[in-house]
Image (cartoon, rainbow, N blue to C red):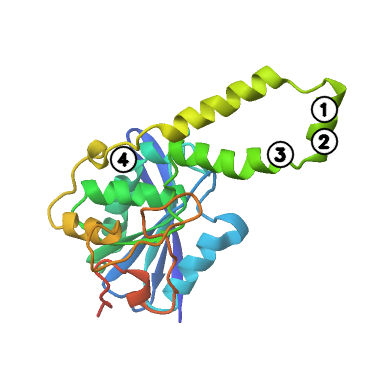
Amino acid sequence: MPYTETPLTFECRGDALVGILTQPENPATLGVLIIVGGPQCRTGSHRQFTLLARGLARHNIPSLRFDYRGMGDSTGDLRNFEEIQEDVSAAFQAFRTHSPATRRIVLWGLCDAASAAIFHTRLNPEVAGLILCNPWTRTEQSLAKAQIKHYYRSRLTDRQLWKKILSGQFRLTQSLRELCTAALKMARPSPPRDTLPPPVGKNAARLDRLCGTDPAHSQRPGPDGPGIRGDCQGLRSLENLAFIPGRHPS
């Protein structure tokens, strides 16, 4: 299926963001805005976002992948996933401007970018859906629990540890302090759900379905912690891609 790839530059708070618009010859009315995760540029590890965009184009689905501020070819200071909402908004508007046939836009995110997509959906009622791959759901409590379960327990059977203890090289006070700190963090109550901004309009029900609060939908825990549906559905049809609201475009 023929498609074109067009480099775009658009503004975000005085900085220049760079993206690639992948446009099929006969585009569907629904497009995918690809938000990269972690310290990656718009191509992704092993060119995964480039390949994703081209795979979508073969199914007539347009997409925009971009570098947010401080990454890749975009200017500005580096930000974490909790601080890129303005970048996502700028890309969202650029997608609409440069792809006029696109009437609805789905957000696609990997790892912490999946969490950024959730945050943005709470703020932007125009988002048509979410595609979340391995969302970042870690808290201080879950990290402390993982450290105690997978690190400290395994250390008890570590030969090198016992050699250090028997030779007097083991820093007992420091290790006990770190263990107690992790245990205290694990014992703390989880932060309340309402620490995030309230969902906007019709997205409230969608987010309830996504996060598992609707009993008609199940939760699937990811490797970083439970609570957000983190499975990456197959990319062969838009019913699998955009599971909120899950309709194939015309």
The image shows residue 217 at horizontal and vertical percentages of: 28, 67
Instruction: State which mark lies toward you, 1 or 4.
Output: 1
Decide which of tag 3 and tag 4 comes sooner along the chain: 4
Mark 2: which secondary structure? helix
Mark 3 and mark 4 residues within 8 Å of each other at the beta carbon: no
Q: Amino acid at mark 1?
A: Lys
- Distance between the Cα atoms at labels 4 and 2? 48 Å
Residue at the (22%, 66%) spot, across then down: 103
Mark 2 and mark 1 residues within 8 Å of each other at the beta carbon: yes
Q: Residues within 10 Å of mark 2 (few under 14, many from 20)?
A: few
Q: Residues within 10 Å of mark 3 (few under 14, many from 20)?
A: few
The image shows residue 19 at horizontal and vertical percentages of: 43, 52
Which label was assigned to residue 160? Answer: 2
Decide which of tag 1 and tag 3 comes sooner along the chain: 3
Quadrant in which the C terminus is drawn: bottom left
Instruction: Provide the residue designation for mark 4.
Output: 86
